[in-house]
């Protein structure tokens, strides 16, 4: 990392904050947490917000994770992909779909996706995530196609998951945060 990994000795943080992050993470801080904990307001807000984005949305977890994996690949956020590809599989995705996603992002994923290893909805989600990530806006035709397949609530939640992980990718990239257990780049 470009910044030192946070420790309580370097910067005290309230124990309730550290405990809340540990609870969300299953008892262990990850490298991302060790960067966020340099700022109490950021770490506190992030923990609540990202918990809701990750586990509090009723929209398809598989499709949200597919959008997140698309962001990770397009932004070269290896850390993000390392953590979310397994979550995509756990949520019902397949390795063939992840392989297809990797192929699609080698081209221009903002254009209609045609890879047969992705279903129609998955192809739309990949294109949607790519347009949102690269262009920061969605073409009218794609938005109309999304509206025919998703409720307004699902569109809001899918868009926020993709947008939130664009934020994560940029934070990871700025500080060169690597997956836990991997050497820094």
Image (tube, rainbow, N blue to C red):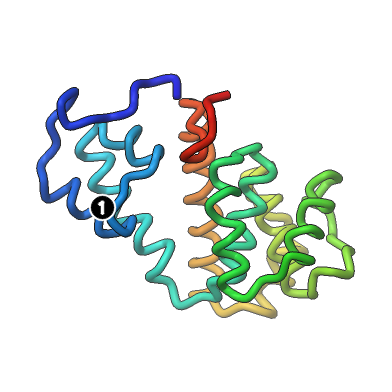
Residue at position x 69%, y 64% in the image = 125
From this view, report whether residue 103 is shown above or below residue 175. below
**Residue 63 locus on image (x, y percent):** 61, 69
* Residue 118 sits in quarter: bottom right
Residue at position x 26%, y 51% in the image = 21
- Give 153 or 113, whichever is nearer the viewer: 113
From this view, report whether residue 14 is shown above or below residue 132. above
* Residue 100 sits in quarter: bottom right
> On the rendered image, what quadrant is the N terminus found in?
top left
Residue at position x 50%, y 66% in the image = 156
**Residue 61 locus on image (x, y percent):** 53, 71
- Give 46 or 85, whichever is nearer the viewer: 85
From this view, report whether residue 175 is shown above or below residue 48. above
> On the rendered image, what quadrant is the C terminus found in?
top right
* Relative side of 155 to 137, left or right: left
Residue, disc 1: 22
Q: Please give the count of numbered marks on the rendered protein.
A: 1
The 10 Å Cα crowd at callout 1, few under 14, some 14 to 19, many 20 or more, is some
From this view, report whether residue 107 is shown above or below residue 56. above
Q: For the residue labelled by badge 1, is the local secondary structure a helix, a strand or a loop? A: helix
Residue at position x 62%, y 46% in the image = 72
**Residue 62 locus on image (x, y percent):** 59, 71
**Residue 130 locus on image (x, y percent):** 70, 50
* Relative side of 56 to 180, left or right: left
């Amino acid at each position: 990392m470009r910044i030192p990994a946070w420790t309580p000795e370097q910067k005290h943080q309230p124990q309730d904050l550290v405990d809340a992050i540990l609870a969300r993470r299953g008892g262990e801080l990850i490298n991302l947490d060790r960067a966020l904990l340099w700022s109490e307001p950021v770490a506190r807000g992030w923990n609540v917000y990202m918990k809701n984005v990750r586990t509090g949305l009723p929209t398809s977890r598989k499709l949200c994770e597919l959008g997140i994996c698309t962001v990770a690949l397009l932004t070269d956020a290896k850390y993000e992909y390392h953590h979310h590809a397994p979550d995509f599989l756990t949520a019902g995705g397949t390795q063939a779909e992840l392989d297809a996603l990797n192929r699609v992002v080698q081209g221009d994923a903002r254009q209609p996706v045609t890879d047969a290893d992705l279903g129609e909805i998955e192809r739309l989600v990949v294109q949607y995530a790519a347009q949102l990530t690269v262009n920061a806006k969605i073409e009218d035709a794609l938005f109309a196609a999304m509206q025919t397949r998703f409720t307004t609530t699902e569109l809001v939640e899918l868009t926020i998951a993709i947008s939130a992980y664009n934020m994560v990718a940029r934070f990871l990239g700025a500080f060169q945060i690597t997956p836990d257990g991997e050497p820094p780049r």
